[in-house]
Amino acid sequence: MVQKSKKPPSAAKIVAPVAPKRRGRPRAYEPDVALGKALDLFRRDGFAATSLDDLSAATGMNRPSLYGAFGDKRELYIKSYQRYRDDARAAMVDIFRADAPLRERLERIYRIALDIYLSGESGPRGCFTVMTAASEAVSDPDIRTMVVEGLTELDKAFGICFRHAKERGELPEGTDPASLAHLASATIHTIAIRARARVPRKELEAIVKGAIDVLCGAK
Amino acid sequence: MVQKSKKPPSAAKIVAPVAPKRRGRPRAYEPDVALGKALDLFRRDGFAATSLDDLSAATGMNRPSLYGAFGDKRELYIKSYQRYRDDARAAMVDIFRADAPLRERLERIYRIALDIYLSGESGPRGCFTVMTAASEAVSDPDIRTMVVEGLTELDKAFGICFRHAKERGELPEGTDPASLAHLASATIHTIAIRARARVPRKELEAIVKGAIDVLCGAK
DNA sequence: TGATTTTTGTACTGTCTTGGATAATATTAG
DNA sequence: CTAATATTATCCAAGACAGTACAAAAATCA
């Protein structure tokens, strides 16, 4: 009922990005940008400290519209988190798939991570997973599942990186790609936390540089 | 006024743990254990989601007593965080100071970290700094300062570890102790996050083991 | 004993909170 | 033009919330 099918089951799914001629009064908001605003709020203040009034003000939608579009607060939070993960994945997937030397790939991944964590008008926004979702994860099984998925996805992506590098001889024979992958993920996590504490980008870049040196087996 | 001197300025500071014969009605609570209960709540639910009623119920103190003893909610949160840091430091300082081989020191540190993060009746409690304090750090300068202090303190402790190890020849000549220290801290952070997502101890121990292998330059 | 001091217990205030009910509005379908 | 439909805008209800006022209670001091 909440998410009722938006169209009568038409023969073919039309992917028309424009005017499917909906029936009633037109929406005064764009769901995508509204969700983006909600994401920004949740990311800055967390679940509990973000009120529906805040969300209403930020999205320009009034309360009933919010409910109609996204469900209750928790559903909106989860949809925001999904959006965040989708965005983050989209920003990194090309680099993970790219056919570049290990060091270059790592440099590019961490540069993007820093961009994500440090952007934001009212201070660095940090990582949704680390800053707010992980907190909710203890008490909310659905969020917990998403967090675990996100963590293992990152581990795996790094894992593939290091395995490739080892196969190409970029890494010494004895190295364990899985361990290096976990350390690479850990570096993501530590800079997310430090970014949130307003550690300046220069320092974070130094930490990243040191980590890359170790992970690439340089000296 | 909040923290008024508890005794009339006596000649010598008496460290008597018993009955200094206070004047009025005796307290029905012990400040230390009450603060511990408050810490547990804040750690589980974060600042915003923890209400004064919750705190009142958990500590057994009623609202006015809470205010009298610890100040308002934010002050109580900060005092809880200080308590957490004191406890964590106390649990690790001996190991950091101990004169043991690098690998053994790391193993002991991480074992204690896991104990801290995984304990708790209603699920793993995670790390106060990572789970809730870092979130508040963007908007609250005082908390931010405490978080940064905590992070750098850990970095430094690990830094001393690795520098010692290098001086003793436990590490190859080219290694950079500061980078290894940051990776050791990052490992602390990553297990704190994963613990909160209810990743089982076995897996966390495997991650730690892999990290130690890399950090000790094994293989 | 009576005065003083400190803490407790109860009750209160005004604000904020989530979620929803209702009516007005804007569009399409026939 | 009329009916159907989807969205908006306004308002409301019930409860949670932080913080405080005030009197009763329990101790020490003189």
Image (cartoon, coloured by chain):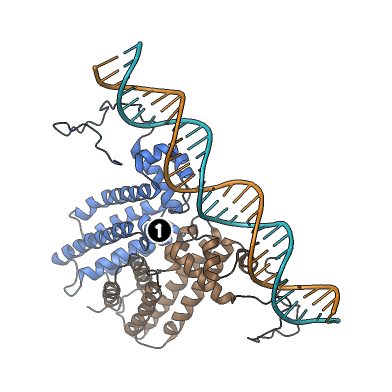
Chain colours: A brown, B blue, C cyan, D orange
Give the percent coordinates (x, y) of residue B193.
41, 61
Q: Residue at x 29, y 40 (%)?
A: B1
Please provide percent x and percent y for residue B47.
43, 53
Is B47 or A34 nearer to us in this picture?
A: A34
Residue A164 appears in view: yes
Q: Is residue B10 above or below residue A215?
A: above
Front residue (pair C26, A190):
C26
Decide: is A38 above or below A141: below
The residue lying at 54 percent from left, 59 percent from top is A141
Looking at the rendered image, the quarter that the C terminus of chain A falls into is: bottom left
Residue displayed at 39% across by 41% down = B67
Does residue B198 show up? no
Q: Residue furthest bottom?
A: A99
In the rendered structure, the residue with mark 1 lies on which chain? B
- Spot occupied by residue B173 in the image (x, y as percentages of width and height): 16, 73
Q: Quadrant of the N terminus of chain A?
A: bottom right
- Whole-percent x, y for residue A126 in the image: 40, 68
In the image, B24: left or right of A30? left
Query: In this view of the protein, which residue sits in the foreground, A10 or B61?
Result: B61
Q: Quadrant for residue B141, please give it.
A: bottom left
Give the labeled residue for mark 1: B131
Q: How many numbered marks does the figure carry?
A: 1
Q: Amino acid at mark 1?
A: Met
In the visual, does B162 lie left or right of C30?
A: left
Asked where in the image residue B190 lies, by quadrant, the reply is bottom left
Crowd tier of the residue under label 1, counting other residues whose Cα lies within 10 Å: few below 14, some 14–19, many 20 or above? many
Q: In the rendered image of this protein, does residue B65 appear above or below residue B104?
A: above
Label 1 residue SS: helix
Which residue is painted at 47% across and 58% down in the image?
Answer: A49
- On screen, residue B45 versus residue D8, left or right, reads left
* In the rendered image, the vertical position of residue A47 relative to residue C1, given as above or below: below
